[in-house]
Structures are given as structure tokens and as C-alpha cells.
Image (cartoon, rainbow, N blue to C red):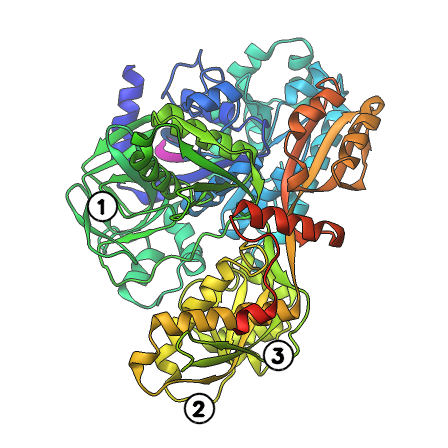
Amino acid sequence: MGRREDNIREAQKIMDKPSYIRNIGIAAHIDHGKTTLSDNLIAGAGMMSEELAGKQLLLDFDEQEQARGITINSANASMVHTYKGENHLINLIDTPGHVDFGGDVTRAMRAVDGCVIVCCAVEGVMPQTETVIRQALKEKVKPVLFINKVDRLINELKVTPEEMQKRFVKIIKQVNDLVTKVVPQEFRGKWFMSPESGTVAFGSAYHNWAISVPYMQKQGVTFKDIYDYLNQGRQKELLKKAPLHQVLLDMIIMHLPNPVEAQKYRIPHIWHGDEGSEIGKAMVHCDPRSIPVMMVTKIIIDPHAGEIASGRLFSGTVERGQELFVIGMPGNARAQAVSVAVGPDRIPVEKAIAGNIVMVSGLRSAIAGSTVSGDPDIDAFEKIVHVSEPVVTVAVEAKHMKDLPKLVEVLRMLAKADPSLRVEINQETGEHLLSGMGELHLEITEYRIQKEQGIEVKTSPPIVVYRETIMKRSQREFEGKSPNKHNRFYFLVEPLPEAVVNAIRSGEIPSDERIKDAKAMAKQLEGLGMEKEDVKHVYWISGSNIFLNCTKGIQYLHETRELLIDSFKEAMTKGPRAWEPCMGVCVKLMDAKLHEDAIHRGPGQVIPAGRSGIYGAMVEAGTTLLEPKQKIFVTVPNELMGGVNRELNSRRCTIEDMPMEGDQVTIIAAAPVSELFGFAGAIRGATQGRALWTTEFLGFTPIPRELLDNATREIRTRKGLKPEPPTADYYSA
């Protein structure tokens, strides 16, 4: 244990030297070896026993992670590594590879400056590899590549040295092609990865060895030697000659930026406040003497310490007992404790300076994505935009009435810790609806409620979350009347161009927040296909829907602006067809007649009038449902392909491609999420358990016309509504 204690003491010293810190993420497709790699790096740095490394899965310390053999939570660990005689501190975040936990990867990328993309030498580049590269580059996080499981090429696939090198070249090319597609303009050509430059390493995380070209030159080892060692089963000797932690940590320190370098280009990208201000300059220069500004990327629920906010400190110093503010939330908070992570352990520290990944307890109103600062008036960081959205819902009920208040509290806490979860409490029915990224995501959440929080619950079978949209432009202005008939609003609706919807969903155009620069937004919207006259009148953007005020000179309208925006938000949260969220709808307020006395145009009058007017216009334009789809990749031996195809065809899947490699075929198909429940068991049965399969979120497409009415009736009945949706006349009454 002595070496570990020395390392922790050394880590605390280096925390004060940002240029000797590297904040990195480990990201990859599921089962490509991220957690085993992270374990062995930590062991090599003296933070755990080397015998247990790769078997203990220190960073998969959650019981469910160990039972299922996958990473569910991103986990932090800090380690010390000596490079060219100087000690460096590496803060590592091991992220999940399963598509249901992609939100954790996105949030982790906000905290780090560099990442190691892990790619299996046997499977090569997989769908989630592409997703994590996209997530990293979107946050301006610099990648390096580690090709893992090289031993399997030789021991299982029996490849020749030439075939091995060919496979490496193919993987490196595929990864670089993906990077080239999405790399920020300023780094085009600079973030290219190659073995010669030392930004690619090869090895086996399980057997604890790795090699890179610079290391081979230094040690006088060749690829042929590696091949011979593996062919003769001498991996233990290889581990002594080329220890994994030495090669990889050297590569990380040499090629990934420290916070002082990275914040110069990352801050203008993730923070849109005034760069010339004192706080702007402090963050760009990673200044520890300024006001503390921290981005919370994860909330950890600790049974003893309560909620702990983990995140990246971009400027200033956080100390125990310091007054802090969660931007956008009322009141202040005190930092009750400050700590850093080593796997499941938190090591308390008195203070932490800019450039570190830190944990602070006492920030009760913080959620993952919050900005925390010593100044309540600074601009918040840009919203973290997730690749996919919650598409599966279950109803959760407490088995015992006495547990109901605790269940409400636990659900709120889980939603804070995981923004990819959506919790809705139906006040009328007392039902708690939990929406997540997929079946596994909800299963894990249910496990946490029952086992970790001790609340027995019943859950309904999973159901799909659809979206509502309109099919065409409404033909006439629809009148929405207030209950007292003194106020009238006239609306038109039309579908938004697809490019605009995609830009809002990807975060290029911010939604659900005040519009900071109306002119810049107008220019952006016009470039994406909206009318020049319309883009000048954006009132609000909610979800992927836009509200335009196209009126001229209406008296008192400015006084009802906030209420009209509220009515628009309500209408977009629950559409008229099935009370599902709306998507891609442009609502135009064309005219209004308002009572001169403010008492007659309060919330109880304006909000129902606005909502009815929007609903009526949507129903006249014609509404439909959009169903979520996933892309499925199933890899099976050739002879079992028929069983997979039959299974996919019975689930309304569209087969897009069937590339073959050797005696394996990969079937790529688009599938509605509603048809995928129970797919895991069915595909195992159809292939005698020999299929490898994975999914990625594909977006929403209109439900087939022949299924629309049935789906609408089912959803409405489930929600306690009349089976048939209202006509336009209902809203003009």
C-alpha cells in the first residue's frame, strides 16, 4: 500500500501545476476493453495491485456493472506518471460503451481535453466507435488511438504478420476518416493519427502490454518480434519489455494537451460569454487566482455524503467552506468537502485549483450540466447536447404506500444524476413515468431504486415515446379565444425545414433559453432554409419547435409575451393528437385582439387561448406521429443469416446492407424501437447465442399510415383520454 499512499501524496502536489496535468477520457464501442485498459493503467501507476488489474475492474465498482460485465457509469481516477524525469498527474474518466449510456460519454467529454479511442483489433471500427469520436470532436477533445486485443488476432484468427499489419492500417484509416469528417476546421490535418507520429499504440489491455513506434525504436523491438512473442505464448516476457502503462501514459503526456493549452481553444467553444471580461480571460488562461468557475458533468449519489457534484474546474480555486452559486438557481451553497477520485475512493483535499477534475459536496441545486461559480452573475457554459433522446418509458409505482414520498425524492435525485433520464409525475393519476434511452437504461434505473435505495416498486411493461408533428401548412388563421372571450389570438402552423430541426437537435441553434443574438440566429435560420421575413420574428424555441411573432403594432401584446410563450411551450410538450412531445413545428402568431384592462388578460385567459389556437391550427394542418428508430448491426456466421433475417423482417425492419468478412456477415437494418422489445432473447434463440449485436439511435420517422390510428387510440387510452383525438371545431368553441 505504501506506493499507493506515496502516489496520492504526489498527486496532491501536482494538482497545483496545471501544465503537468492531463485530463483524459477512455472511449470506445462496448466490449472493446476500456475498463480493463483503465485498470491496468491505474495498477501500473501503483494505485492498485497488479495481479488484480484487468480482473478486478476497479472502475466498474458498481454491482450491476460487475454482474453484466459492462460499464454503466463513467468513473474517475487520478494517477501519477513520470515522463522524462518529471511527475505528471493524469485524471482519467472511463466511459460506458453501451448506446443506452451515451449521455455519460457526452458529459465526460466536457470535462476532459484529450481521449484515448480504444478499438478492438478483431472487430475493428464499430458503430459506437464512430459515435464516441463524434462526441469527442464536438467538444474539441483531441484523440489518440489504442488498438486493443492484438493477441486475439494471432491466437484466435491465426493471421500472418503481413495480415496483422494490413488490419492495423485498415483500422487506422477508418478512424482517421471518421475524424476528418467531424474534426473542427482549425485542427484539420493536425489531429491525424499515425503510428509514426506516436499517436497510435497497439497491445493487449488484458495481458498488460502495449507498443508504439517511438517505444519500439527506443527499445529496439519490431512488429515481427511482437508477432513471435505472441505466437510462442510469451506474453509475460512482452509485458516486461513493453508494459502497457509505460507506453500509453507516455503517449498521453506527449500527445494530449494540458489544461493551459487546451482551454485556449476549448473555452470559446463551450462558453459564449465575453472573452474579454476578467472571468473570460481567466478561463482561457486557466488562472487559479480568479473567481472559481466549474462545469458539473456528473452527480454522484453517495449514501453517506449525499449528492456530490463532480466536474472540471476551469478557473479559480475551490476550497472547503467556500460560498458558491449554481448559475440559474436561487440562493447560494457552501462547499462542504472538496475531493479527487481514485476509482471508488474519494481522497479529501483542502482546495483544488483550475485545470483539475474535482468533486464538491454541498451543492444541492446542481445537476449534471450546471455551471458553478463564486460569482452568481456570470454566463453559464453551453448546454450539453446528447446524441440520442429518451424513447422508452415505464410507469413506476411504489409497492407500499409508505414508500411513496421516498420514491418521489429518489426519482428526482436520479434525474439530477442522469439528465438522459426523464421523470414525469402525473399529479392526477399519481403515476410516475420514467423515460430512458432503452430497455437496459430503465432496467438499471429500476435496480438502483430497489437495491440501492431500498424501495420496492412495480413497473409497467416498457412503452415507446413518440413525437407529434404536422404534415403540411395550415390553410387559414385559426382563432384561439380566451375563456372570458375578451382576448383572441390568430395562428398559422407549418412544418420546419429538416435542416433547421437537425440544427436545433444537435445544439447548433440553442433551444429553451433566452435568445442572445437575434441577428446571428436569423442569419443562421435563413441559411438553413427558413423565409427571410420569418427569421426576424423568433419569439422562442422549445424542443425542436419555433414560435414566431408575425404581428405588427398590436397594443398590449408585449405584456402578454411571456404568457404566450408559456402557452406555446405547453402545446409543444403535449401535442393535440396523443399528448406526445411535438417536433419540427413552426407556430406563427399572425394577429391578436386584447382587452385593454390587464385584469382581463391574465395567465388564466391568455395561456388557454394560445394553446387552443395552436392546437386548432395543428389539427387543421393534419397531425401525425413520428416513431423512434434504431440502427441495428447484427454480426453472425454466414450459415445463421437466414434466422436473423426472419427475425428482423418480423419486426418491421428495413435491411440496408450486408457486408461480409470471412465467414461472418454483418446485417445492418433500421428498426422501430416499438418492435425491439424482447429482441435480445429472440436473436439469441435464432442464432444459438452466436450473434453479436449492437444498436445506435437513428432519429424519428413518420409512422406508417395504416398503423397511425391504432397507435393514436392506444396511446390516448393509456393516458386516460378519449380514444379519438379532437377535431379543429373542439378548439374553436
Q: Is residue 87 magenta?
A: yes
Q: Which mark is residue 161?
A: none
User: What's the residue type where badge 3 is placed?
Assistant: Glu
* In this picture, residue 498 sits left or right of residue 455: right
Residue count near mark 2 (Cα–Cα under 10 Å), binned few <14, some 14–19, many ≥20:
few
Badges 1 and 2: C-beta atoms under 8 Å apart? no
Q: Is residue 424 left or right of residue 294?
A: right
Q: Which range is magenta?
A: 83-91
Q: CA distance from mark 1 to mark 3?
A: 48 Å
Disc 2 from disc 3: Cα separation = 21 Å
Observer-nearest of 717 and 185? 717
Residue type at numbered disc 2? Gly
Residue placed under numbered mark 1 in the picture: 318
- Residue ID at (54%, 70%): 731
Q: Does residue 41 lie above or below 570 as drawn? A: above
Point out the frontmost of discs 2 and 3.
2
Secondary structure mostly seen in magenta is strand
The residue that disc 3 covers is: 531
Q: Quadrant of residue 83?
A: top left
Which is more N-terminal, label 2 or label 1? 1
Residue 369's x, y, as percent?
38, 49
Name the residue tied to disc 2: 553
